[in-house]
Amino acid sequence: MMPNLIFSQQQNVTLKQCRDSAKINWPNFKKIALQEQNLDIITSTLNKNYLPKLTLSGSAMYQSEVVVFPEIDVPGLKGFFPTLPHDNYRTDLQLQQIIYDGGNTKSAKDLQIAASQLDETQVEIENYNLMEQINQLYLNILLLDQNNNILLTAKSEITENIKFLQSAYNNGTVLISELNKIIAEKLKIDKQLLDTKTSRINLIQSLASITGIDIYSETIFQAPREFQNTPTTIPQLRLFTAQQGINKANLAMEFRAKFPKLSFFANGGYGRPGYNFMDTKLHPYGIVGVNLSWNIIDWGTYTKQQEKNIINQKIIDASKEVFVKQNNLEIQKIKNDINNIRDQIVLDAKIIELKVNVKNSSWSKLKNGTITSNDYLKDFNDLKIAQQALEINRIKLIQKEITLNHLIGVQY
């Protein structure tokens, strides 16, 4: 079992794997599916407006007084008027069916669809920004790994130097102070390695929490090499479109409120009294008909809503224009940064080549006793700094290229 365990802890991880895993693990990605289910429920509920509505009601009442008709002393009409009972009972079944609602139900569904699209777009923006957070965590880990490799190489070299100087000190050709300076430099590197390890653990824990991937300290993070530059519509721009959809749907709702509404109704019951209050017996009764309602005058409400819609549209267009301009400026800046970093990488390689020669020369001089440890350590650290600068620029180049993809809307 041990070889399998070691292998599992030394797995390779790519940036794409982290993104894909986050889409499954991070709760925010589940919101869109839930919002779609919610929209289905809402639209299904609104569709039921077209179905007939049945209402069952019943009542039992006792009246302290009732209408009493005067006695008529006319032959043949005596007892013509009934004695109305004090207790009344009725059970009614009411049916109502919309024939034409002026398009209000359709407008309500369109508004719900527009609202759902707006909510989904906001979630997409959050998820898109989460992808950028994953990018930053991943690239920072890569940067720490490269810096760690440089420190390990420097430590290996300084360890060999200590062995040489220790032997020289034992032979009496080097002062103890010169040896201690080199040893102190090794301890300094050990401290830097410890800081790098701690920072890497913190980044790994954050990345593992977001992606749900079991990431270990031995995990190898592969540097991204291929970059897709096919732009699509970024979520922020889709947000403006969704806001416009909400604006139009609200106006349509206001417009449809002016339309006439026609419905059919039927009412059947059993009890007393019915529609003929003279019939004091329990008996069935019923009525059918149509209802028409029409808000003929809205006192300019729709006109004001149109003006509001135009103003909102201008606000949305202005916000969109500002965003597009700022995004285009940022894209151009990133492209300039990419060209600059590429030039710097070429120069960094040349600088390192020269500083390697300088450092090797200083080491030879230190061994021959013509310079001090301070002189050597200066050249040693200058080389290390140059190597770190090169690796930083390489990671920055990857970071800028990924950021460019993010700005132009490449889908991950």
Image (cartoon, rainbow, N blue to C red):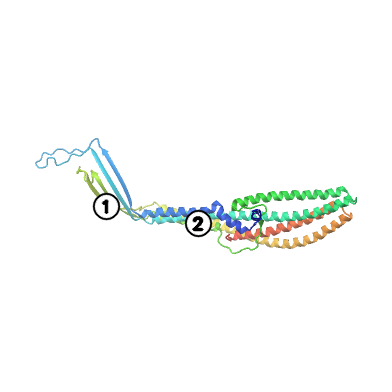
Q: Name the residue tied to disc 1.
A: 288
Amino acid at the residue labelled 1: Val
- Dot 2 alpha-carbon crowd within 10 angstroms: few under 14, some 14 to 19, many 20 or more: many
Instruction: Decide: few, some or many residues near mark 1? Use Cα within 10 Å; few <14, some 14-19, many ≥20.
Output: few
Q: Nearer the viewer, residue 320 or 354?
A: 354
Examine the rendered structure and indicate whether residue 323 appears above or below residue 272.
below
Q: Is residue 57 above or below residue 360?
A: above
Q: On the image, numbered disc 2 is attached to which residue?
A: 242
Q: Residue 334 occupies which quadrant of the picture?
A: bottom right
> Label 1's element?
strand
Q: Residue most toward the top?
A: 64
User: In terms of depth relative to the viewer, which is nearer, 233 or 191?
Assistant: 191
* Whole-percent x, y for residue 253 in the image: 42, 54
Quarter of the image with the C terminus in it: bottom right
**Mark 2 vs mark 1, CA separation in Å:** 45 Å
Mark 2 or mark 1, earlier in chain: 2
Name the foreground residue: 48 vs 37. 37
Inspect the image, locate mark 2, and give the three-letter code of the amino acid beneath it.
Ala
Position in image of residue 369 (x %, y %): 89, 54
